[in-house]
Image (cartoon, helix red, strand yellow):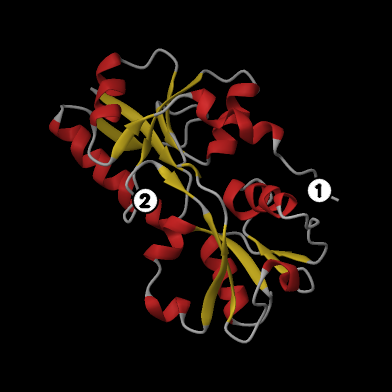
């Protein structure tokens, strides 16, 4: 059986997706990269996945990964600054925030929701970098004071990319970005995704809260 798949997350997620493809092959399932509008299997941000479902796309959430260093299928944002930069969330408000993209949960919406829980406003000074790794670089090079980084990517980054940086805050845990399938995908594929190494079952309901917590741009 051959199916189309897409990984829409950062570089560290590609490694997980590649291992997943290898596992599926042991089950006689080929998962080939595709640019199709609705691939059979997608590994993407929980907010993006939930927005696709809300828009009426035939998407079913089935599983989520257990990232290295975690014991269950969760992740969070780590807020990073230079070692000579802001030391806490309050002082970070005075500088520029590096945002990987405004559609990101961990790099924008989830972080802003976490700030609200601490009684802090949406940062007004922002620079969009195009990716979490680029946001780390923006902080290192002084183009931004802080950035909210996917914790799984932060842990994966080589040490030289984290030199001169420190974690000043960690958000609450969120469900890890889900694996979803196109509605009607063969049960054998779904069962294999759920039973794959380092995955746990997941459902749409796990990500419903993200829709309510989205932050409008201002």
Image quadrant where residue 56 sits: top right
Report, in whole angstroms, how far the alpha carbon at label 2 lies from the one at label 1: 29 Å
Query: Considering depth in this image, is 205 or 40 the residue closer to the camera?
Result: 205
Could you tell me if residue 32 is visible in this image? yes
Q: Residues within 10 Å of mark 1 (few under 14, many from 20)?
A: few
Q: Which residue is mark 1?
A: 217
Q: Which residue is mark 2?
A: 14
Query: Residue drawn at (59%, 37%), measured in percent from left and top?
Result: 47
Q: Residues within 10 Å of mark 2 (few under 14, many from 20)?
A: some
Q: Residue 127 at x, y = what percent?
A: 72, 66
Q: Tell me the quadrant of the picture where the N terminus can be found.
A: top left
Tell me the element at label 2. helix
Q: Which mark is residue 22?
A: none
Tell me the element at label 1. loop
Q: Residue 124 at x, y = what percent?
A: 83, 62
Which residue is most to the top?
184
Could you tell me if residue 96 is visible in this image? no
Question: Does residue 186 appear left or right of residue 91 in this picture?
Answer: left
Q: Is residue 198 above or below residue 140?
A: above
Question: Does residue 160 appear left or right of residue 197 in this picture?
Answer: right
Image quadrant where residue 161 sits: bottom left
Instruction: Evaluate if marks 2 and 1 touch, with contact meaning CB atoms under 8 Å apart.
Output: no
Query: Considering depth in this image, is 183 or 173 the residue closer to the camera?
Result: 173
Query: Residue drawn at (35%, 50%), measured in percent from left and top?
Result: 67
> Closer to the observer: label 2 or label 1?
1
């Amino acid at each position: 059986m051959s199916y189309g798949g897409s990984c829409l997350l950062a570089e560290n997620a590609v490694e997980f997706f590649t291992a997943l493809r290898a596992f599926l092959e042991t089950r006689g399932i080929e998962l080939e990269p595709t640019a199709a509008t609705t691939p059979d299997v997608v590994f993407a941000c929980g907010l993006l996945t939930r927005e696709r479902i809300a828009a009426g796309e035939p998407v079913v959430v089935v599983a989520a990964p257990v990232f290295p260093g975690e014991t269950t299928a969760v992740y969070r944002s780590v807020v990073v600054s230079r070692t000579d930069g802001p030391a806490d969330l309050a002082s970070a408000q005075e500088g520029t925030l590096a945002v990987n993209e405004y559609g990101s949960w961990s790099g924008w919406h989830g972080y802003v929701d976490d700030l609200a829980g601490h009684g802090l406003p949406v940062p007004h000074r922002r620079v969009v970098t195009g990716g979490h790794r680029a946001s780390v670089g923006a902080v290192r090079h002084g183009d931004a004071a802080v950035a909210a980084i996917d914790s799984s990517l932060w842990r994966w980054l080589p040490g030289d990319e984290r030199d001169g940086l420190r974690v000043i805050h960690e958000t609450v845990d969120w469900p890890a970005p889900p694996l979803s399938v196109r509605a009607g995908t063969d049960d054998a594929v779904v069962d294999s995704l759920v039973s794959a190494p380092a995955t746990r079952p997941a459902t749409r309901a796990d990500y419903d809260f993200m829709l309510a917590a989205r932050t409008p741009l201002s």
